[in-house]
């Protein structure tokens, strides 16, 4: 028993490290797809998210998300991490798969991811102090309450809603907030001008590509760790479905975008891979390899259409976060009722109800936070700051001073 616990716990700790590594992937992707003059600002935001996210999850979030006995909607087990020590030694009865400490750290990595999704959508024009206040409130309160509804044994869990590793609980939770934020924030200067959509090319495609590959690697921990043990059959199946969905998403996205726009767009290829990963995350342990390929391929097509839709309704999302995390997150959650072991009309309806419940808490929660910030301290930088770059105005330095470049 103790030997099995050790093996399971080691696997969970490895997966925790992989999910932590994803934050480097998010940072590289975000700076790669945006302009050089905002690089330090984006890196600062990403560092703040992971550091503050872990502290908040320790002090507040973990016990909001896993409150033990509660009414299914809201519960709280107290401030800080209660020690799982029995008579001075670690209580191994906490779980057959991992220790209390490992559970906290693994779940804490997920919590920070939701805010990272928003960071990319609001890049290049949000006030840093306003964004940091949002992170504190959203990661500290909204995310763990929403998470408790399913992963904490709440009312959606009792209803039968299924989200294996977070297509909705992580990605759509971040995606809904991103959608609200870019609506309230407005587009970057020059994005929509004279009825045309302006192109703001990212300044470093190698960084963006490295970011996506790192994220794909991190998903081995994101989904593989969500088995919550080192079970050979489930972990290996989960990694196979995860990888196949990513591959199918990338291929479908670049083929579809090339057919529509007559050029090989690497940003669509990259986001297609991410869309496939987000899409498979809700049911990675329930799907066959063929199911995973179909889910990923549909996600890849959704990415191309989703990015075009966001532009058409005049919302400015520099990295495609809404299409990737929100729209593909919804698709992946509903796909649990269409493909795999749980497929069925009743399950599909349950998944739909879950999507609607998360939409409600995330839209309302993020709107209240951003709107109060907007009418108090403001959420948008000045036109001068935006035009000249947030790096010099917010941080007083250039990301690449030795190159002497000043790209605007």
Image (cartoon, rainbow, N blue to C red):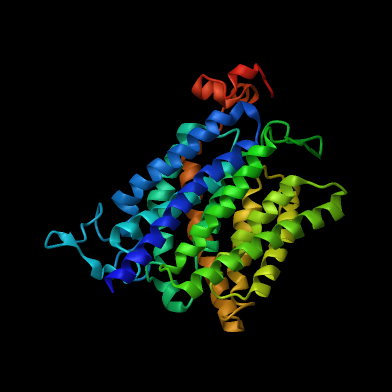
- Can the viewer see residue 112 in this picture? yes
Q: In which quarter of the image is the N terminus?
A: bottom left
User: Viewed as shown, does residue 76 lie left or right of 398?
Assistant: left
Residue 234 x, y percent position in the rendering: 50, 73
* Outermost residue to the left: 87
Quadrant holding the C terminus: top right
- Note whether residue 377 is visible: no
Q: Residue at x 76, y 48 (%)?
A: 312
Within the image, what quadrant is residue 11 found in? bottom left
Residue 236: x and y in percent read 53, 69
Question: Residue 262 placed where, x, y %?
Answer: 88, 49
Q: Is residue 58 left or right of residue 250?
A: left
Determine whether, in the image, residue 171 is placed left or right of residue 295.
Answer: left
Which of these two is toward me, 181 or 301? 301
Tally the numbered discs: 0
Establish if 124 lies above or below 218. Answer: above
- In the image, is residue 370 above or below residue 388? below
- Where residue 168 sits: x, y (%)? 53, 62
Q: Residue visible at 65% across and 35% down?
A: 34
Question: In this view, which residue lies farthest toward the front?
Answer: 3
Give the camera-side residue of 163 and 375. 163
Name which residue lies at 60% across and 36% down.
Answer: 31
């Amino acid at each position: 028993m103790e030997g099995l616990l050790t093996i399971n716990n080691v696997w969970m700790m490895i997966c925790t490290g992989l999910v932590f590594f994803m934050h480097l992937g998010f940072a590289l992707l975000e700076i790669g797809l945006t302009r050089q003059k905002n690089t330090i600002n984006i890196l600062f935001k990403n560092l703040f998210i992971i550091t503050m996210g872990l502290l908040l999850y320790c002090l507040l979030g973990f016990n909001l998300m896993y409150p033990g006995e509660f009414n299914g909607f809201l519960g709280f087990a107290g401030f800080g991490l209660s020690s799982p020590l029995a008579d001075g030694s670690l209580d191994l009865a906490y779980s057959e798969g991992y220790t209390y400490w490992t559970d906290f750290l693994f779940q804490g990595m997920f919590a920070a991811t939701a805010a990272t999704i928003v960071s990319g959508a609001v890049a290049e024009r949000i006030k840093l102090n306003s964004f940091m206040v949002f992170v504190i409130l959203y990661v500290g309160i909204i995310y763990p309450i929403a998470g408790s509804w399913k992963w904490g044994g709440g009312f959606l869990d009792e209803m039968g809603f299924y989200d294996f590793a977070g297509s909705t609980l992580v990605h759509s939770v971040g995606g809904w907030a991103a959608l609200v934020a870019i609506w309230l924030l407005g587009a970057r200067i020059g994005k929509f001008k004279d009825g045309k959509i302006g192109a703001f090319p990212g300044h470093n495609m190698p960084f963006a590509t490295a970011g996506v590959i790192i994220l794909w690697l991190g998903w081995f921990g994101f989904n593989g760790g969500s088995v919550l043990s080192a079970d050979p059959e489930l972990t290996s199946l989960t990694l196979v479905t995860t990888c196949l969905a990513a591959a199918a998403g990338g291929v479908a996205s670049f083929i579809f975008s090339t057919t529509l726009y007559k050029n090989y767009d690497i940003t669509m290829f990259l986001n297609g891979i991410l869309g496939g990963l987000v899409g498979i995350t809700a049911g990675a342990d329930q799907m066959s390899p063929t199911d995973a390929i179909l889910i990923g391929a549909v996600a890849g097509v959704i990415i191309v259409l989703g990015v075009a839709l966001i532009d058409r309704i005049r919302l400015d999302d520099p990295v495609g976060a809404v299409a990737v995390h929100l729209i593909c997150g919804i698709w992946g959650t509903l796909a649990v009722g269409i493909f795999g072991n749980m497929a069925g009309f009743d399950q599909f309806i349950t998944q739909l109800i879950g999507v609607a419940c998360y939409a409600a808490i995330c839209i309302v929660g993020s709107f209240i936070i951003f709107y109060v910030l907007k009418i108090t301290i403001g959420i948008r930088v000045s036109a001068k700051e935006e035009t000249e770059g947030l790096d010099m105005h917010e941080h007083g330095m250039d990301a690449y001073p030795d190159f002497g470049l000043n790209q605007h």
